[in-house]
Image (cartoon, coloured by chain):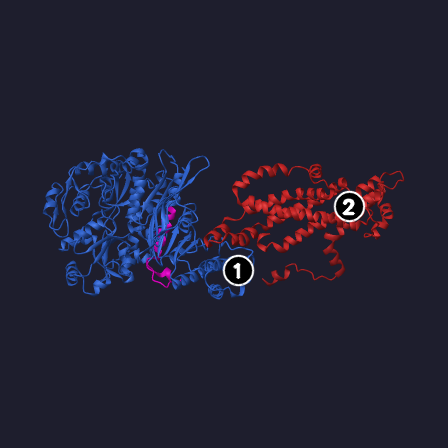
Chain colours: A blue, B red
């Protein structure tokens, strides 16, 4: 369908009494199709009502314009009826007269009998026959809102604009009216734009949810497509596999906006205490079993023991959010996938280089590759079977999920595919999906498999949607997985804080690897504010035997989640060099000619050593030997370029000098 | 649970009907009557001595019994009963107040809906409204040459300011929501006026009218004292000149009661016209 309403790069600037100006909306661009239900959501004062008024024509944009069916909107009109927040019924007119006021005016050219029919039809439509003669003062809030909706619909508008239509109603009335509105909208195929605060209401009603950032200069922060089939029912939409991930995404967005506001207001201050430069830290993590060291450090008091008394753990929706939080300075530190500090430092993905420091590895292993049950039923058991299945259906695109370009998930998945002669860019399609949404996407059939950390593999197995074709232990045992990452500028500014953070987490890692503590840790992780998964999904591989979802019996995996033993935490350089070669192999980044200096700069073994010595732990590194992977290929850290040249499946490899300091620091 | 329910204090069913009635009316009727009685007693005590300048209440009633009993006699000229005197005054008020209501509401709507007119006229209104009613009398006598139209003009000019100012505010206070509804529906000017603007401003207009009628009744007494002719104001002045103090007191009571009734009448009309939501 073509574009019905186009909001074309709107700015709205309000002049202030003191001569200045306030930019409420900045560069809003939105195209709405006919029959679509779009919701605008955001915090109070973000300009969503202003935007709605501009679309209605009640307010004029300073720049840009609104185009309805090819014609610019310059003034309000009955083709764009508004249902106002406070109903705006005329209190001196009865229900019938309120509806008639518009009908008689707008449809003046129709015979009186037809107009009367339309009025009575809409009174019935909202079920107010018994109250048609009453004045608004005698009606309840829900009834008033129904009159307002009837008044709007009676004019057969092309576009229905609703400004927090159910905001003032109790939950029960609201639910009933929402269903009624949905039904009416579907029957009359009317295009709707609604403003709301309520995330559940937005998910229930909308085809698309447009989230606006806080003002000033409010703009579209994120758009969610709500692909729940219609007709929808209030009680059933929550069962949609993606419902909670969408909901979480929205709540996360709104929370971030709130924190942003606080920071802008200067309320977030650096609190120095206990000989540390900053004890109030915002640390980002992703709901995964291997976020355990952060959870343990917080819950078991390791942060406090080292003076970090006000640590907040922020559950982030995806790794990109962590990268962004780092770039904007929202996060002080974060759990990161192994390649992230170095890819951020090099400015991968056309971002400006953001020098990062990693002085601690948090975990090793813990990932697996899951393929869908559907493939299992086709007889796929191994990589060779998967290749055969791909060749058997050349016209079907098989999509596999991974979590972040520079994560070990992406790199080992690609390595695994390539080792079996499958080109990860041409024979299959790889897509980035946040870990908690993998299972629902697999269930919905959007993807055929994925590589992700636990508990999201065990969950697919337990729910019967997939089976584990390979674990880390089969592919690259003992590889570095999650690391602690901070900005280099931050580490230089708060050196004692950074050291305390490394020490606290190092002790937490030690705690995590004591088998006696694992039961307790599973209980901590299962809490909603952390992983929020069921105990049954977290236990396999962590405590219990690991079930691959195949006919094979569950098997105990040694060191499937490794947090401390065997020098886990040393910021190893050889593996990061391997990561660099793999990123270059798949064209994610050029291979840096100055790789040695970049790795030295990011992997701060000196800081780790200092922390380990203060804790009286050994600070020895791992042996600087070659890495031998499952396919027998040996990676020689002394000749990365030779290794790259010998690979068979790869992209065009660029080898460049990368100057990290060329771009000014983006952090304020 | 049951014991708790039982132990709750129960409202006692009323047994004593006269006592209940007494309770019901005591606040609104009996208390003011008691106060009135006490005031009359004090007045009686203060004015009991034969040398007193003012008559006591009992003497007042004795002196004016003829007037009380016959409110409608007409001996020609200005020698008329109090009912007719008041009717004459009310007639003037009716004409003056009606004129001021029509002109005041019209002007108020004009000024309220037009920012230019508001900016231009509001300061002038603010100055004019502070002028005491009687100060207008000489100039109106000079202009109109006749006493009766001058008195009516004083009524008009006294009552008009609160009506204009309140109507203006009423029009300016129309909620933006109602204006938005009108804009979205693209209501014609005529329909906007009758369906939105006027009903929305009505409560404010009635506030203005209520203040206006009170002021016009205040003004008419003073004006009639000066211009003469039939009317309760001149009756008072005439009685003073003839030293009939009891008649003055009786007239004052009548003036007070009529003023109250006028105010209540406008309030009653307002309560019938203004819709539930807007009160």
At horizontal 86% and vertical 50% (from top left) the residue drawn is: B66
- On whether residue A231 falls in the magenta region, the answer is yes
Tell me where the magenta segment starts and ends, as one range: A227-255
Percent from the top left, x then y, of residue A408? Answer: 22, 48
The location of residue A201, given as percent across then percent down, is 41, 56
Relative horizontal placement of residue A616, taking residue B252 as reference (left or right): left
Numbered circle sitting on residue B232: 2
Judge whether residue B158 is colored magenta.
no
Q: Which mark is residue A97?
A: 1
As drawn, is B225 to the left or to the right of A315?
right
Q: Position of residue A577 (x, y in %)?
A: 17, 42
Q: Nearer the viewer, residue B249 or A341?
A: B249
Q: Closer to the camera, A210 or B223?
A: B223
SS label for mark 1: helix
- The quadrant the C terminus of chain A occupies is top left
Q: Which mark is residue B58?
A: none
Q: CA distance from mark 1 to mark 2?
A: 48 Å
A212 and A239: which is toward the camera: A212
How many marks do you count on the picture?
2
* In-image side of A12 versus A91 (left or right): left
Q: Position of residue B112 (x, y in %)?
A: 55, 44
Pick out the residue farthest to the right. B50
Secondary structure at numbered mark 2 = helix
Q: Quadrant of the N terminus of chain A?
A: bottom left
Report which quarter residue A637 is drawn in: top left
Q: Is residue A379 above or below residue A648?
A: below
């Amino acid at each position: 369908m073509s574009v019905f309403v186009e909001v074309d790069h709107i700015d709205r600037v309000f002049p202030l009494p003191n001569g200045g100006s306030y930019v409420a909306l900045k560069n809003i661009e939105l195209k709405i199709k006919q029959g679509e239900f779009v919701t605008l959501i955001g915090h109070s004062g973000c300009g969503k009502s202003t935007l709605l008024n501009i679309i209605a024509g009640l307010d004029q944009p300073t720049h840009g314009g609104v185009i309805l069916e090819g014609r610019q909107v310059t003034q309000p009109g009955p083709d764009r009826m508004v249902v106002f927040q406070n109903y705006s019924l005329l209190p001196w007119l009865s229900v019938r007269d309120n509806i008639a006021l518009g009908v008689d005016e707008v449809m003046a050219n129709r015979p009186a009998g037809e107009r009367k029919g339309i009025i009575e039809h809409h009174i019935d439509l909202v079920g107010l026959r018994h109250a048609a003669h009453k004045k608004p003062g005698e009606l309840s809030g829900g009834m008033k809102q129904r009159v307002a909706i009837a008044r709007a619909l009676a004019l057969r508008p092309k576009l229905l604009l609703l400004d927090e239509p159910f905001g003032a109603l109790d939950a029960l009335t609201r639910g009933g009216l929402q269903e009624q509105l949905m039904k009416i909208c579907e029957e009359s195929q009317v295009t709707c734009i609604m403003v709301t605060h309520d995330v559940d209401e937005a998910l229930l009603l909308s085809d698309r949810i447009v989230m606006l950032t806080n003002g000033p200069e409010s703009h579209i922060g994120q758009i969610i497509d709500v692909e729940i089939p219609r007709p929808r029912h209030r009680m059933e939409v929550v069962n949609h596999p993606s419902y909670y991930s969408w909901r979480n995404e929205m709540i996360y967005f709104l929370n971030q906006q709130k924190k942003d506001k606080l920071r802008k207001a200067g309320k977030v201050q650096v609190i120095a205490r206990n000989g540390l430069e900053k004890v109030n830290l915002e640390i980002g993590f992703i709901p995964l079993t291997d976020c355990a060291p952060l959870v343990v450090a917080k819950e078991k008091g390791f942060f406090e023991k080292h003076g970090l008394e006000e640590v907040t753990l922020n559950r982030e929706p995806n790794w990109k959010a962590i990268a962004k939080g780092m770039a904007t300075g929202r996060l002080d530190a974060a759990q990161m996938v192994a390649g992230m500090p170095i890819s951020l430092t090099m400015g991968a993905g056309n971002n400006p280089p953001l020098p990062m420091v990693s002085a601690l590895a948090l975990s090793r292993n813990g990932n697996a590759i899951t393929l869908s049950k559907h493939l299992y039923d086709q007889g796929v058991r191994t990589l060779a079977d998967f290749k055969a299945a791909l060749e058997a259906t050349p016209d079907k695109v098989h999509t596999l999920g991974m979590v972040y370009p520079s994560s070990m998930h992406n790199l080992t998945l690609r390595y695994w595919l390539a080792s079996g002669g499958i080109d990860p860019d041409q024979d299959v399609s790889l897509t980035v999906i946040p870990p908690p949404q993998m299972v629902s996407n697999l269930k919905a059939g959007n993807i055929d498999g994925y590589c992700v950390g636990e508990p999201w593999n065990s969950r697919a197995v337990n729910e019967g949607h997939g089976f584990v074709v390979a674990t880390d232990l089969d592919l690259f045992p003992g590889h570095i997985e999650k690391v602690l990452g901070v900005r280099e500028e931050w580490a230089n500014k708060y050196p004692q804080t950074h050291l305390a953070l490394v020490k606290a987490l190092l002790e937490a890692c030690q705690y995590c690897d004591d088998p006696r503590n694992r039961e307790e840790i599973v209980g901590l992780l299962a809490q909603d504010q952390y992983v929020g998964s069921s105990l049954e999904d977290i236990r396999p591989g962590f405590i219990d035997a690991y079930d691959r979802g195949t006919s094979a019996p569950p098997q105990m995996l040694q060191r499937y989640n490794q947090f401390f033993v065997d020098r886990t935490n040393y910021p190893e350089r050889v593996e990061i060099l391997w990561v660099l070669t793999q990123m270059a192999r798949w064209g994610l980044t050029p291979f840096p000619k100055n790789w040695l200096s970049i790795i030295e700069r990011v992997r701060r073994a000196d800081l780790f050593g200092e922390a380990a010595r203060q804790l009286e732990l050994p600070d020895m590194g791992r042996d600087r030997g070659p890495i031998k992977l499952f396919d027998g290929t040996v990676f020689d850290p002394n000749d990365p370029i030779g290794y790259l040249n010998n690979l068979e499946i790869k992209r065009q490899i660029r080898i460049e000098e990368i100057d990290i300091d060329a771009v000014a620091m983006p952090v304020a | 649970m049951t014991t708790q329910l039982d132990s709750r204090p129960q409202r006692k069913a009323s047994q004593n009907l006269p006592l209940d009635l007494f309770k019901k009316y005591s606040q609104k009727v009996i208390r003011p009557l008691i106060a009135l009685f006490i005031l009359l007693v004090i007045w009686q005590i203060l004015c009991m001595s034969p040398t007193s300048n003012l008559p006591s209440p009992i003497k007042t009633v004795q002196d004016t019994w003829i007037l009380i009993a016959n409110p409608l006699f007409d001996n020609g000229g200005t020698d008329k009963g109090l009912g007719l005197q008041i009717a004459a005054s009310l007639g003037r008020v009716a004409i003056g107040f009606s004129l001021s209501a029509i002109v005041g509401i019209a002007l108020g709507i004009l000024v309220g809906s037009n920012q230019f007119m508001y900016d231009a006229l509001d300061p002038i209104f603010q100055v004019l409204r502070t002028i005491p009613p009687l100060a207008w009398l000489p100039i109106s006598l000079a202009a109109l040459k006749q006493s009766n139209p001058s008195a009516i003009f004083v009524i008009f000019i006294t009552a008009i300011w609160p009506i204009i100012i309140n109507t203006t505010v009423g029009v300016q206070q129309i909620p933006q929501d109602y204006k938005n509804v009108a804009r979205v529906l693209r209501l014609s000017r005529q329909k906007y006026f009758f369906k939105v603007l006027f009903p929305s401003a009505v409560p404010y207009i009635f506030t203005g009218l209520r203040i206006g009628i009170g002021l016009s009744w205040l003004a008419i007494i003073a004006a009639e004292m000066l211009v003469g002719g039939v009317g309760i104001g001149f009756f008072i002045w005439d009685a003073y000149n003839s030293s009939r103090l009891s008649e003055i007191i009786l007239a004052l009571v009548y003036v007070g009661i009529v003023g109250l009734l006028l105010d209540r009448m406008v309030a009653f009309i307002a309560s019938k016209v203004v819709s539930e939501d807007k009160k």
